[in-house]
Image (cartoon, rainbow, N blue to C red):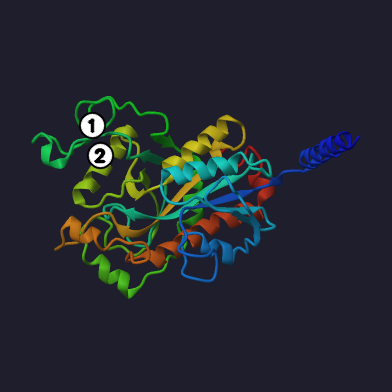
């Protein structure tokens, strides 16, 4: 009898818990802000990419996410922020964990990657913000050490399945090239292009050390595309490689502007989640702001310049964090204040 009662109550408890979860209505999420790193705590100390969003948008509801890098945070308006961790592996696993979590309804959510990046001084200046139409992975490929490449090659890095750099035609693998919703990116750009971005005497001083078509401009909002990958590269020759890599894989449609680490992982998970009907692929935006140039200034070698590159000490670190928030928040605020319009499947860019 005792064994029967134990089994009965055990079965009752499991049934009760199952029923409870089955009856729980998923939380509708309107906007997900994707950030990649934080320096310390989510609030109250030196900021990383998450902190301004938490403090200024009052993301006070914390939802543990044990299968991911970090808990997610929300406010009552339907805004969520997620911290993926650095690198493509962290980003892919965290976004997949969030996207499959039954507590959240993400089917109508807009996703905004909002993080800092290296920038090409040909296209952007320190503290500037770039909305991307194209994101191209820069990790997938073959590589020959620079000391052994043929003399007529511009680089020792080449696409997979090819015998030399930039051999036509381009044949990207799944998850290597992402063409985002260009209409939505254009809408976000038009909404934010007049946003005033902060400039300082220090930024002006640093900019004067660099050459490039945009190197000496005050911070501005633009359209510009991203080469992404966990391999942190630096130098004028690598900058030239990235510009050609973008053109090669986008069939000349993309314009290289920024370089960051995580976004191919984030976007591949979102693509798979869209295939499963859990997110809307047309509602994804990538915003990167320039904390440092991707090449050396006049008078320094690439290695000497790279030695200066550390999170928190980038020449435009705080201005870039601020730009990511003020530009990104302009879009978030517009979406939330007019959700009746933008939540509709026929919203701009849909």
Front-lying residue, 33 or 252 = 33
Real-space CA distance between mark 2 and mark 1, rounded to the nearest whole angstrom: 8 Å
Residue at (47, 40) in percent of width and height:
267
Instruction: Where is residue 109? Give x, y as percent.
Output: 61, 44
Residue at (45, 41) in percent of width and height:
265
Q: Which residue position is annotated with label 2?
A: 244
Mark 2 residue element: helix
Front-lying residue, 326 or 236 = 236
Mark 1 residue element: loop
Front-lying residue, 53 or 44 = 44
Q: Is residue 250 left or right of residue 327?
A: left
Instruction: Where is residue 40? Give x, y as percent.
Output: 48, 65
Q: Is residue 210 left or right of residue 329?
A: left
Instruction: Where is residue 330? Give x, y as percent.
Output: 54, 58
Q: Is residue 63 above or below residue 350?
A: below
Q: Could you tell me if the residues under marks 2 and 1 are in contact, i.e. CB atoms within 8 Å?
A: yes
Residue at (41, 68) in percent of width and height:
198
Q: Residues within 10 Å of mark 1 (few under 14, many from 20)?
A: many
Q: Which residue position is annotated with label 1?
A: 166
Question: The C terminus is located in which quarter?
Answer: top right
Residue at (27, 43) in percent of width and height:
242
Residue 174 found in image quarter: top left
One can see residue 299 in this view: yes
Q: Which residue lies most toward the bottom here? A: 201
């Amino acid at each position: 009898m005792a064994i029967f009662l134990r089994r009965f109550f055990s079965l009752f408890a499991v049934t009760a818990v199952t029923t409870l979860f089955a009856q729980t209505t998923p939380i509708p999420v309107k906007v997900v802000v994707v950030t990649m790193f934080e320096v310390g705590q989510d609030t109250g100390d030196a900021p990383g990419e998450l902190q301004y969003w938490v403090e200024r948008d009052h993301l006070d509801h914390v939802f543990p996410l044990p299968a991911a890098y970090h808990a997610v945070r929300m406010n009552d308006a339907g805004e969520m922020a997620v911290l993926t961790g650095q690198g493509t592996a962290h980003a892919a696993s965290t976004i997949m964990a969030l996207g499959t979590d039954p507590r959240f309804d993400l089917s109508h959510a807009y996703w905004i990657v909002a993080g800092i990046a290296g920038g090409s001084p040909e296209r952007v200046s320190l503290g500037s913000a770039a909305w991307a139409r194209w994101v191209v992975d820069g990790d997938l490929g073959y590589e020959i050490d620079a000391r052994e490449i043929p003399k007529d090659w511009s680089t020792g890095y080449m696409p997979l399945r090819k015998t030399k750099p930039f051999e036509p035609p381009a044949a990207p693998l799944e998850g290597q090239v992402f063409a985002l919703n260009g209409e939505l990116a254009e809408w976000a750009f038009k909404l934010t292009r007049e946003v005033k971005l902060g400039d300082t005497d220090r930024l002006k001083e640093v900019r004067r050390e660099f050459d490039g078509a945009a190197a000496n401009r005050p911070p501005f909002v633009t359209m510009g595309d991203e080469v992404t990958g966990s391999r942190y590269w630096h130098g004028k020759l690598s900058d030239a490689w990235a510009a050609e890599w973008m053109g090669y894989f986008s069939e000349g449609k993309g314009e290289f502007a920024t370089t960051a680490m995580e976004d191919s992982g984030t976007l591949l998970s979102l693509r798979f989640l869209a295939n499963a009907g859990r997110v809307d692929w047309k509602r994804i935006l990538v915003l990167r702001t320039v904390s440092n140039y991707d090449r050396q200034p006049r008078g320094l070698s690439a290695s000497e310049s790279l030695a200066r590159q550390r999170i928190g000490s980038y020449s435009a670190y705080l201005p870039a964090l601020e730009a990511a928030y003020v530009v990104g928040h302009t879009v978030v605020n517009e979406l939330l204040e007019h959700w009746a319009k933008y939540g509709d499947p026929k919203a701009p860019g849909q």
